[in-house]
Image (cartoon, rainbow, N blue to C red):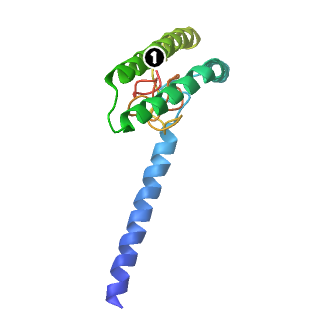
C-alpha cells in the first residue's frame, strides 16, 4: 500500500505545481499586450495591425516555407550540389530580407499606437508557422505580438 501512495503523491504534487505555474503565467499575460499597459482602444488597434501584417505577409511566409522544403530536399541528395544549395540560400535570404523590411514597418506602426509601451518584440509565445521558422522560436516571420519569431528565430519581430 505504501508503494502505491508515494507515486500517487508525487503525481499529485507535480500536477499541483504545474497548475499553479500555469495560473501564474496566465495572470502575467501572453501575447498581445504582454509587458504593455494598453487601453482597450490601443489593444484593438494592435490586434488589427497584427492581423493586417499577417494577411499582407501570408504569401511571403508561404514562399519561405516552400524554399525551406526545397533546401531540405537539396541537402538530402546523395551528392548535394553546392551551386544549387548556394542559389537556394540566396533566394531564402532575399525572402528573409523582405520579411524583415515588413516587420520593421510593422514595428514602427506599433510604436505609433503605443509609443511608451511598445517593446518591439513582446512575443515569447508558443510559436506560429511551420516548424521553427528560419531559426529557433517557432515562427516564420511576423510581428512579435503573439507568437514566435520574426523569420530569424527570435520573438516575432
Q: Is residue 123 visible?
A: no
Q: Residue at x 40, y 70 (%)?
A: 11
Q: Quadrant of residue 41?
A: top right
Q: Residue at x 32, y 34 (%)?
A: 79
Where residue 146 appears, x then y in whole percent? 54, 31
As rendered, which of 51 and 41 lies closer to the eye? 51
Where residue 44 appears, x then y in whole percent? 67, 22
What is the residue that sits farthest to the front in this orientation? 79
As rendered, which of 129 and 87 lies closer to the eye? 87
Where residue 33 appears, x then y in whole percent? 54, 27
In the drawing, does residue 108 fall left or right of residue 78?
A: right
Q: Is residue 136 visible?
A: yes
Q: Is residue 8 above or below residue 93?
A: below
Q: Is residue 145 above or below residue 27?
A: above
Q: Quadrant of residue 133?
A: top left
Q: Secondary structure at mark 1?
A: helix
Please state the total of marks drawn on the protein image.
1
Where residue 104 appears, x then y in whole percent? 49, 11
In the drawing, does residue 114 fall left or right of residue 154?
A: right
- Report the residue marked by disc 1: 91
What is the residue that sits farthest to the bottom in this orientation? 1
Q: Is residue 69 above or below residue 151?
A: below
Task: Sort mark 1 into few (<14), some (14-19) or many (20+) by Cα contacts within 10 Å.
Answer: some
As rendered, which of 128 and 46 lies closer to the eye? 128
Q: Residue at x 53, y 29 (%)?
A: 66
Q: Where is the N terminus found, in terms of image quarters? A: bottom left
Q: Residue at x 34, y 39 (%)?
A: 78
Amino acid at each position: 500500500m505504501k508503494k502505491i501512495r508515494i507515486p500517487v503523491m508525487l503525481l499529485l504534487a507535480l500536477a499541483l505545481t504545474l497548475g499553479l505555474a500555469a495560473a501564474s503565467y496566465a495572470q502575467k499575460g501572453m501575447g498581445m499586450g504582454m509587458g504593455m499597459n494598453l487601453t482597450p482602444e490601443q489593444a484593438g488597434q494592435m490586434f488589427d495591425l497584427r492581423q493586417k501584417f499577417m494577411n499582407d505577409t501570408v504569401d511571403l511566409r508561404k514562399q519561405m516555407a516552400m524554399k525551406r522544403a526545397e533546401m531540405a530536399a537539396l541537402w538530402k541528395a546523395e551528392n548535394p550540389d553546392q551551386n544549387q544549395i548556394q542559389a537556394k540560400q540566396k533566394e531564402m535570404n532575399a525572402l528573409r530580407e523582405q520579411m524583415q523590411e515588413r516587420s520593421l514597418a510593422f514595428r514602427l506602426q506599433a510604436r505609433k499606437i503605443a509609443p511608451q509601451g511598445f517593446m518591439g518584440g513582446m512575443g515569447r509565445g508558443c510559436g506560429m508557422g511551420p516548424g521553427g521558422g528560419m531559426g529557433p522560436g517557432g515562427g516564420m516571420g511576423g510581428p512579435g505580438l503573439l507568437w514566435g519569431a520574426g523569420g530569424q528565430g527570435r520573438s516575432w519581430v
